[in-house]
Image (cartoon, grey):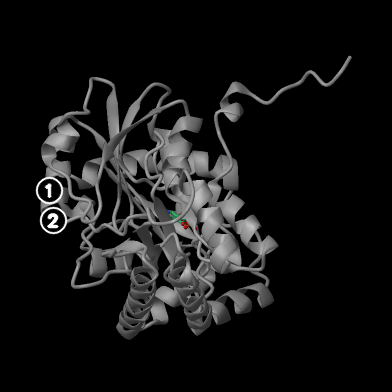
Amino acid sequence: MGNMVEVSVNASRIKQSEIRIMSVECERVRGVNLAQGVCDTEVPEPVRCAATAAVEAGLNQYTRLDGILALRSAISKKLRENNGLVVDPETELLVTSGATGGFFAACMAMLDAGDEVILFEPCYGYHAHTLTAMNCKPVFVRLNAPDWKFSAEDVERVITPRTKAIIVNSPANPSGKVMSRAELGWLAEIAVQHDLLVITDEIYEYFLYDGHEHISIATLPGMAERTITISGFSKTFSITGWRIGYAACPARWKTSIGYFHDLTYICAPAPFQHGAAAGLNELPKKFYEDLRLEYLHKRNLICSALSQAGLKPSIPQGAYYVLADTSALSGKNSKEKAMYLLQETGVAAVPGNAFYHDGAGENLLRFCFAKKLNDLENACNRLQRLRAHATV
Ligand code: PLP
Protein backbone atom coordinates (compact mmCIF):
# COMPACT_ATOMS: atom_id res chain seq x y z
CA MET A 1 0.00 0.00 0.00
CA GLY A 2 1.17 3.57 -0.68
CA ASN A 3 1.02 6.49 1.70
CA MET A 4 -2.72 6.81 2.20
CA VAL A 5 -2.90 8.74 5.43
CA GLU A 6 -3.79 12.40 4.87
CA VAL A 7 -3.97 15.38 7.20
CA SER A 8 -7.37 16.14 8.71
CA VAL A 9 -10.03 18.14 6.87
CA ASN A 10 -9.39 20.81 9.47
CA ALA A 11 -5.68 20.96 8.71
CA SER A 12 -6.23 21.16 4.97
CA ARG A 13 -8.17 24.43 5.49
CA ILE A 14 -5.27 26.16 7.24
CA LYS A 15 -2.50 27.65 5.13
CA GLN A 16 0.96 28.87 6.03
CA SER A 17 1.10 32.53 6.90
CA GLU A 18 2.30 34.82 4.07
CA ILE A 19 4.37 36.57 6.69
CA ARG A 20 6.59 33.56 7.22
CA ILE A 21 6.84 32.97 3.47
CA MET A 22 8.07 36.55 2.90
CA SER A 23 10.58 36.19 5.74
CA VAL A 24 12.05 33.11 4.05
CA GLU A 25 12.26 34.92 0.69
CA CYS A 26 13.86 37.91 2.37
CA GLU A 27 16.53 35.78 3.98
CA ARG A 28 17.26 34.18 0.61
CA VAL A 29 18.07 37.56 -0.98
CA ARG A 30 19.66 38.93 2.26
CA GLY A 31 17.17 41.80 2.29
CA VAL A 32 15.79 43.92 5.14
CA ASN A 33 12.80 42.19 6.66
CA LEU A 34 9.92 44.59 7.32
CA ALA A 35 7.50 41.70 6.92
CA GLN A 36 7.52 40.04 10.32
CA GLY A 37 6.43 41.76 13.54
CA VAL A 38 9.61 40.86 15.37
CA CYS A 39 10.89 43.74 17.43
CA ASP A 40 14.63 43.31 17.51
CA THR A 41 15.12 46.30 19.80
CA GLU A 42 16.86 45.77 23.15
CA VAL A 43 15.22 43.95 26.06
CA PRO A 44 14.95 46.31 29.09
CA GLU A 45 17.60 45.54 31.69
CA PRO A 46 15.39 44.59 34.66
CA VAL A 47 13.49 42.14 32.46
CA ARG A 48 16.67 40.53 31.14
CA CYS A 49 18.41 40.40 34.51
CA ALA A 50 15.46 38.95 36.42
CA ALA A 51 14.98 36.20 33.84
CA THR A 52 18.68 35.29 33.91
CA ALA A 53 18.69 35.37 37.70
CA ALA A 54 15.65 33.08 37.74
CA VAL A 55 17.44 30.54 35.53
CA GLU A 56 20.53 30.70 37.76
CA ALA A 57 18.39 30.36 40.88
CA GLY A 58 16.89 27.16 39.49
CA LEU A 59 13.37 28.50 38.83
CA ASN A 60 13.11 26.36 35.73
CA GLN A 61 10.19 24.05 36.39
CA TYR A 62 6.47 24.15 35.67
CA THR A 63 4.62 26.89 37.49
CA ARG A 64 1.01 26.89 38.62
CA LEU A 65 -1.09 26.68 35.48
CA ASP A 66 -2.21 30.29 35.86
CA GLY A 67 1.32 31.59 36.44
CA ILE A 68 3.41 32.77 39.40
CA LEU A 69 1.73 35.01 41.96
CA ALA A 70 4.41 37.72 41.59
CA LEU A 71 3.51 38.17 37.93
CA ARG A 72 -0.25 37.92 38.43
CA SER A 73 -0.04 40.55 41.18
CA ALA A 74 2.09 42.85 39.02
CA ILE A 75 -0.33 42.49 36.07
CA SER A 76 -3.31 43.14 38.33
CA LYS A 77 -1.65 46.35 39.62
CA LYS A 78 -0.81 47.46 36.07
CA LEU A 79 -4.38 46.79 34.90
CA ARG A 80 -5.76 48.85 37.80
CA GLU A 81 -3.35 51.76 37.40
CA ASN A 82 -3.02 51.96 33.60
CA ASN A 83 -6.20 50.47 32.23
CA GLY A 84 -8.71 51.24 34.99
CA LEU A 85 -9.57 47.54 35.27
CA VAL A 86 -9.99 45.83 38.62
CA VAL A 87 -8.90 42.20 38.28
CA ASP A 88 -8.39 39.74 41.15
CA PRO A 89 -4.98 38.10 40.56
CA GLU A 90 -6.21 34.88 42.18
CA THR A 91 -9.51 34.31 40.41
CA GLU A 92 -9.66 36.52 37.32
CA LEU A 93 -6.20 36.42 35.80
CA LEU A 94 -4.25 33.83 33.88
CA VAL A 95 -0.63 34.16 32.73
CA THR A 96 -0.46 32.65 29.26
CA SER A 97 2.04 31.56 26.67
CA GLY A 98 1.94 34.91 24.89
CA ALA A 99 -1.22 36.71 23.89
CA THR A 100 -1.51 33.92 21.31
CA GLY A 101 -1.82 31.23 24.00
CA GLY A 102 -4.39 33.38 25.80
CA PHE A 103 -6.43 33.89 22.65
CA PHE A 104 -6.33 30.23 21.71
CA ALA A 105 -7.36 29.05 25.18
CA ALA A 106 -10.10 31.70 25.41
CA CYS A 107 -11.55 30.61 22.06
CA MET A 108 -11.38 26.93 23.02
CA ALA A 109 -13.14 27.61 26.30
CA MET A 110 -15.82 29.96 25.02
CA LEU A 111 -16.73 29.02 21.44
CA ASP A 112 -18.46 26.07 19.79
CA ALA A 113 -18.32 24.87 16.20
CA GLY A 114 -20.72 26.93 14.09
CA ASP A 115 -20.57 30.02 16.31
CA GLU A 116 -20.25 33.23 14.34
CA VAL A 117 -17.61 35.66 15.50
CA ILE A 118 -17.30 39.26 14.30
CA LEU A 119 -13.87 40.57 13.33
CA PHE A 120 -12.74 43.82 11.78
CA GLU A 121 -10.94 43.62 8.48
CA PRO A 122 -8.09 44.10 7.61
CA CYS A 123 -7.53 41.57 10.31
CA TYR A 124 -4.67 39.88 12.16
CA GLY A 125 -4.47 36.45 10.54
CA TYR A 126 -4.05 34.45 13.74
CA HIS A 127 -7.42 35.66 15.01
CA ALA A 128 -9.29 34.57 11.89
CA HIS A 129 -7.34 31.32 11.46
CA THR A 130 -7.79 30.30 15.10
CA LEU A 131 -11.55 30.65 14.65
CA THR A 132 -11.44 28.67 11.42
CA ALA A 133 -9.39 25.95 13.10
CA MET A 134 -12.19 25.64 15.67
CA ASN A 135 -14.88 25.40 13.01
CA CYS A 136 -16.29 28.76 14.03
CA LYS A 137 -17.36 31.19 11.33
CA PRO A 138 -15.44 34.47 11.15
CA VAL A 139 -17.76 37.28 10.01
CA PHE A 140 -15.98 40.39 8.82
CA VAL A 141 -16.78 44.08 9.14
CA ARG A 142 -14.72 45.83 6.48
CA LEU A 143 -12.85 49.01 7.44
CA ASN A 144 -11.43 51.28 4.76
CA ALA A 145 -8.25 53.32 4.48
CA PRO A 146 -7.15 55.84 5.40
CA ASP A 147 -9.03 56.24 8.71
CA TRP A 148 -10.58 52.77 9.09
CA LYS A 149 -13.79 54.14 10.62
CA PHE A 150 -17.00 52.18 11.13
CA SER A 151 -20.52 52.82 12.41
CA ALA A 152 -22.72 50.90 14.85
CA GLU A 153 -24.89 49.91 11.84
CA ASP A 154 -21.91 48.28 10.12
CA VAL A 155 -21.72 45.87 13.06
CA GLU A 156 -25.48 45.49 13.63
CA ARG A 157 -25.86 44.48 9.99
CA VAL A 158 -23.80 41.29 10.37
CA ILE A 159 -25.38 40.04 13.61
CA THR A 160 -27.42 36.85 13.34
CA PRO A 161 -28.89 34.47 15.93
CA ARG A 162 -25.60 32.50 15.69
CA THR A 163 -23.37 35.46 16.62
CA LYS A 164 -21.49 34.64 19.80
CA ALA A 165 -18.62 37.09 20.05
CA ILE A 166 -16.82 40.18 18.79
CA ILE A 167 -13.03 40.32 18.51
CA VAL A 168 -11.51 43.72 19.21
CA ASN A 169 -7.87 44.50 18.42
CA SER A 170 -6.96 48.08 19.25
CA PRO A 171 -4.38 49.38 18.44
CA ALA A 172 -4.77 47.12 15.44
CA ASN A 173 -2.47 44.99 13.40
CA PRO A 174 -2.20 45.66 10.44
CA SER A 175 -4.04 49.00 10.08
CA GLY A 176 -2.73 50.76 13.19
CA LYS A 177 -6.29 51.85 13.94
CA VAL A 178 -6.99 52.87 17.53
CA MET A 179 -10.67 52.52 18.33
CA SER A 180 -12.23 55.70 19.69
CA ARG A 181 -14.32 55.84 22.86
CA ALA A 182 -17.41 56.29 20.68
CA GLU A 183 -16.63 53.20 18.58
CA LEU A 184 -15.91 51.06 21.64
CA GLY A 185 -19.11 52.41 23.19
CA TRP A 186 -21.15 51.18 20.19
CA LEU A 187 -19.52 47.77 20.42
CA ALA A 188 -20.24 47.63 24.15
CA GLU A 189 -23.90 48.55 23.62
CA ILE A 190 -24.26 45.96 20.87
CA ALA A 191 -22.54 43.29 23.00
CA VAL A 192 -24.87 43.97 25.94
CA GLN A 193 -27.99 44.14 23.77
CA HIS A 194 -27.23 40.86 21.94
CA ASP A 195 -25.57 39.14 24.92
CA LEU A 196 -22.23 38.71 23.16
CA LEU A 197 -18.78 37.84 24.41
CA VAL A 198 -15.97 40.29 23.61
CA ILE A 199 -12.38 39.12 23.28
CA THR A 200 -10.01 42.07 23.14
CA ASP A 201 -6.36 41.75 22.08
CA GLU A 202 -4.54 44.78 23.50
CA ILE A 203 -0.97 43.69 22.77
CA TYR A 204 -0.10 47.10 21.22
CA GLU A 205 -1.60 49.17 24.05
CA TYR A 206 1.61 51.15 24.62
CA PHE A 207 2.21 51.97 20.95
CA LEU A 208 0.10 55.10 20.46
CA TYR A 209 0.75 58.19 18.34
CA ASP A 210 -0.68 61.68 17.78
CA GLY A 211 -2.52 61.81 21.11
CA HIS A 212 -4.56 58.65 20.56
CA GLU A 213 -5.69 57.05 23.80
CA HIS A 214 -5.92 53.35 24.64
CA ILE A 215 -9.23 52.33 26.20
CA SER A 216 -9.83 48.81 27.48
CA ILE A 217 -13.37 47.90 26.41
CA ALA A 218 -13.84 45.93 29.66
CA THR A 219 -13.98 49.28 31.52
CA LEU A 220 -17.15 50.37 29.68
CA PRO A 221 -20.55 49.87 31.37
CA GLY A 222 -21.70 46.25 31.47
CA MET A 223 -18.54 44.96 29.83
CA ALA A 224 -16.36 43.54 32.63
CA GLU A 225 -18.65 40.51 32.95
CA ARG A 226 -18.59 39.70 29.23
CA THR A 227 -15.01 40.56 28.21
CA ILE A 228 -11.74 38.63 28.05
CA THR A 229 -8.87 41.13 28.01
CA ILE A 230 -5.74 39.72 26.44
CA SER A 231 -2.34 41.34 26.29
CA GLY A 232 1.31 40.50 26.85
CA PHE A 233 4.92 41.56 26.93
CA SER A 234 6.24 40.41 23.53
CA LYS A 235 6.03 43.87 22.05
CA THR A 236 6.44 46.19 25.03
CA PHE A 237 9.57 44.46 26.34
CA SER A 238 10.79 43.18 22.91
CA ILE A 239 10.56 39.55 24.00
CA THR A 240 8.50 37.91 21.25
CA GLY A 241 10.37 34.63 21.76
CA TRP A 242 9.73 34.42 25.49
CA ARG A 243 6.02 33.72 25.17
CA ILE A 244 4.60 35.65 28.11
CA GLY A 245 1.10 37.13 27.99
CA TYR A 246 -2.11 37.09 29.99
CA ALA A 247 -5.87 36.87 29.90
CA ALA A 248 -8.10 38.70 32.37
CA CYS A 249 -11.66 37.41 32.56
CA PRO A 250 -14.65 36.95 34.85
CA ALA A 251 -13.90 34.33 37.55
CA ARG A 252 -16.60 32.00 36.21
CA TRP A 253 -14.59 31.47 33.00
CA LYS A 254 -11.07 31.25 34.39
CA THR A 255 -11.06 27.52 35.18
CA SER A 256 -12.08 26.54 31.64
CA ILE A 257 -9.69 28.95 29.93
CA GLY A 258 -6.92 27.80 32.27
CA TYR A 259 -7.74 24.18 31.53
CA PHE A 260 -7.37 24.62 27.77
CA HIS A 261 -4.19 26.63 28.22
CA ASP A 262 -2.84 23.85 30.43
CA LEU A 263 -3.67 21.23 27.79
CA THR A 264 -1.56 22.96 25.15
CA TYR A 265 1.14 24.81 27.06
CA ILE A 266 1.00 23.58 30.71
CA CYS A 267 2.26 27.02 31.74
CA ALA A 268 4.12 30.03 30.41
CA PRO A 269 7.95 29.66 30.63
CA ALA A 270 8.87 29.93 34.32
CA PRO A 271 12.04 32.09 34.33
CA PHE A 272 10.55 34.49 31.81
CA GLN A 273 7.52 35.00 34.06
CA HIS A 274 9.99 36.35 36.64
CA GLY A 275 11.52 38.61 33.98
CA ALA A 276 8.14 40.08 33.02
CA ALA A 277 7.20 40.62 36.68
CA ALA A 278 10.43 42.56 37.26
CA GLY A 279 9.74 44.67 34.18
CA LEU A 280 6.28 45.61 35.43
CA ASN A 281 7.49 46.29 38.96
CA GLU A 282 10.72 48.13 38.19
CA LEU A 283 10.40 50.03 34.93
CA PRO A 284 9.38 53.66 35.46
CA LYS A 285 6.64 55.51 33.54
CA LYS A 286 9.42 57.06 31.48
CA PHE A 287 10.21 53.67 29.93
CA TYR A 288 6.76 53.57 28.33
CA GLU A 289 6.96 57.21 27.25
CA ASP A 290 10.39 56.66 25.67
CA LEU A 291 9.09 53.57 23.92
CA ARG A 292 6.25 55.59 22.44
CA LEU A 293 8.59 58.36 21.27
CA GLU A 294 11.05 55.87 19.76
CA TYR A 295 8.30 54.21 17.76
CA LEU A 296 6.76 57.55 16.80
CA HIS A 297 10.11 58.51 15.29
CA LYS A 298 10.30 55.19 13.46
CA ARG A 299 6.72 55.54 12.22
CA ASN A 300 7.52 58.99 10.82
CA LEU A 301 10.68 57.71 9.13
CA ILE A 302 9.01 54.82 7.33
CA CYS A 303 5.91 56.82 6.39
CA SER A 304 7.93 59.60 4.79
CA ALA A 305 10.22 57.12 3.02
CA LEU A 306 7.16 55.32 1.64
CA SER A 307 5.61 58.59 0.46
CA GLN A 308 8.84 59.68 -1.20
CA ALA A 309 9.07 56.31 -2.95
CA GLY A 310 5.57 56.81 -4.37
CA LEU A 311 3.85 54.30 -2.08
CA LYS A 312 0.98 55.94 -0.18
CA PRO A 313 1.02 55.09 3.53
CA SER A 314 -2.08 55.17 5.70
CA ILE A 315 -0.54 56.86 8.76
CA PRO A 316 -1.03 54.47 11.70
CA GLN A 317 -2.53 55.81 14.94
CA GLY A 318 -0.95 53.01 16.95
CA ALA A 319 0.84 49.62 16.82
CA TYR A 320 3.94 49.34 14.62
CA TYR A 321 2.82 48.55 11.10
CA VAL A 322 1.98 50.68 8.08
CA LEU A 323 -0.35 49.66 5.30
CA ALA A 324 0.68 51.42 2.12
CA ASP A 325 -1.18 51.72 -1.16
CA THR A 326 1.22 50.22 -3.67
CA SER A 327 -0.94 50.53 -6.79
CA ALA A 328 2.09 52.13 -8.46
CA LEU A 329 4.16 48.93 -8.20
CA SER A 330 4.37 46.29 -10.92
CA GLY A 331 2.46 43.10 -10.26
CA LYS A 332 -1.05 41.72 -10.76
CA ASN A 333 -1.65 41.18 -7.06
CA SER A 334 -0.14 41.97 -3.68
CA LYS A 335 2.06 38.86 -3.68
CA GLU A 336 3.61 39.88 -7.00
CA LYS A 337 3.99 43.45 -5.76
CA ALA A 338 5.74 42.25 -2.61
CA MET A 339 8.10 40.08 -4.68
CA TYR A 340 8.75 42.95 -7.07
CA LEU A 341 9.56 45.26 -4.18
CA LEU A 342 11.89 42.66 -2.67
CA GLN A 343 13.71 42.19 -5.98
CA GLU A 344 14.06 45.92 -6.68
CA THR A 345 14.93 47.15 -3.20
CA GLY A 346 15.66 44.18 -0.95
CA VAL A 347 12.86 45.27 1.38
CA ALA A 348 10.38 42.57 2.39
CA ALA A 349 6.77 43.50 3.18
CA VAL A 350 3.62 41.42 3.64
CA PRO A 351 1.14 41.15 0.74
CA GLY A 352 -2.06 42.99 1.70
CA ASN A 353 -4.38 40.13 0.80
CA ALA A 354 -3.05 38.22 3.83
CA PHE A 355 -5.29 40.47 5.95
CA TYR A 356 -8.53 39.89 4.05
CA HIS A 357 -10.67 36.78 3.64
CA ASP A 358 -11.91 37.46 0.12
CA GLY A 359 -8.97 38.53 -2.01
CA ALA A 360 -9.20 42.22 -1.11
CA GLY A 361 -6.09 44.22 -0.24
CA GLU A 362 -4.34 43.43 -3.53
CA ASN A 363 -2.95 46.97 -3.75
CA LEU A 364 -1.72 47.01 -0.16
CA LEU A 365 1.57 46.02 1.43
CA ARG A 366 2.24 45.98 5.17
CA PHE A 367 5.54 47.30 6.51
CA CYS A 368 6.62 46.63 10.09
CA PHE A 369 8.73 49.37 11.68
CA ALA A 370 9.70 47.53 14.88
CA LYS A 371 13.30 47.42 13.75
CA LYS A 372 16.62 48.66 15.02
CA LEU A 373 17.06 52.24 13.80
CA ASN A 374 19.99 51.30 11.53
CA ASP A 375 18.02 48.57 9.79
CA LEU A 376 14.99 50.80 9.40
CA GLU A 377 17.09 53.61 7.92
CA ASN A 378 18.69 51.08 5.59
CA ALA A 379 15.21 49.95 4.48
CA CYS A 380 14.11 53.57 4.00
CA ASN A 381 17.15 54.26 1.80
CA ARG A 382 16.58 51.11 -0.20
CA LEU A 383 12.95 52.11 -0.84
CA GLN A 384 14.21 55.23 -2.63
CA ARG A 385 15.56 52.98 -5.40
CA LEU A 386 11.96 52.81 -6.58
CA ARG A 387 11.96 56.52 -7.41
CA ALA A 388 14.34 55.94 -10.26
CA HIS A 389 12.13 53.19 -11.62
CA ALA A 390 9.78 53.77 -14.53
CA THR A 391 6.66 52.12 -13.05
CA VAL A 392 6.49 54.43 -10.01
N1 PLP B 1 -1.86 39.84 18.75
C1 PLP B 1 -1.57 40.64 17.71
C2 PLP B 1 -2.61 41.57 17.19
C3 PLP B 1 -0.31 40.58 17.10
O1 PLP B 1 -0.03 41.37 16.06
C4 PLP B 1 0.65 39.69 17.60
C5 PLP B 1 1.99 39.57 16.97
O2 PLP B 1 2.25 39.99 15.89
C6 PLP B 1 0.32 38.89 18.68
C7 PLP B 1 -0.96 38.99 19.22
C8 PLP B 1 1.29 37.89 19.25
O3 PLP B 1 1.49 38.16 20.59
P1 PLP B 1 2.29 37.13 21.51
O4 PLP B 1 3.71 37.15 21.07
O5 PLP B 1 2.11 37.71 22.88
O6 PLP B 1 1.66 35.82 21.35
**Mark 1 belongs to which amino acid?**
Gly
Residue at label 1? 185
Q: Residue 111, relative to residue 247: is it above or below?
A: above
Q: Is residue 98 left or right of residue 61?
A: left
Identified at 59% across, 42% down, the residue is: 16
Q: Position of residue 9 (x, y in %)?
A: 59, 22
Q: Residue furthest top?
A: 1
**Mark 2 belongs to which amino acid?**
Arg
Q: Quadrant of residue 193?
A: top left
Residue at label 2? 181
Q: How many marks?
A: 2
Q: Nearer the viewer, residue 332 or 225?
A: 332
State which quarter of the image contains the N terminus.
top right
**Tags 1 and 2 touching, CB below 8 Å:** yes
Give the secondary structure at mark 2: helix
Identified at 38% across, 66% down, the residue is: 320
Location of ligand 1 given as a quarter of the image: bottom left
Q: Residue 268, relative to residue 210: is it above or below?
A: above
Q: Residue 365, relative to residue 279: is it above or below?
A: above
State which quarter of the image contains the C terminus.
bottom left
Q: Position of residue 191 (x, y in %)?
A: 18, 37
Q: Position of residue 111 (x, y in %)?
A: 39, 30
Q: Residue 168, relative to residue 381: is it above or below?
A: above
Q: Is residue 42 left or right of residue 115?
A: right
Mark 1: few, some, or many residues within 10 Å (few <14, many ≥20)? some
Identified at 68% across, 71% down, the residue is: 58
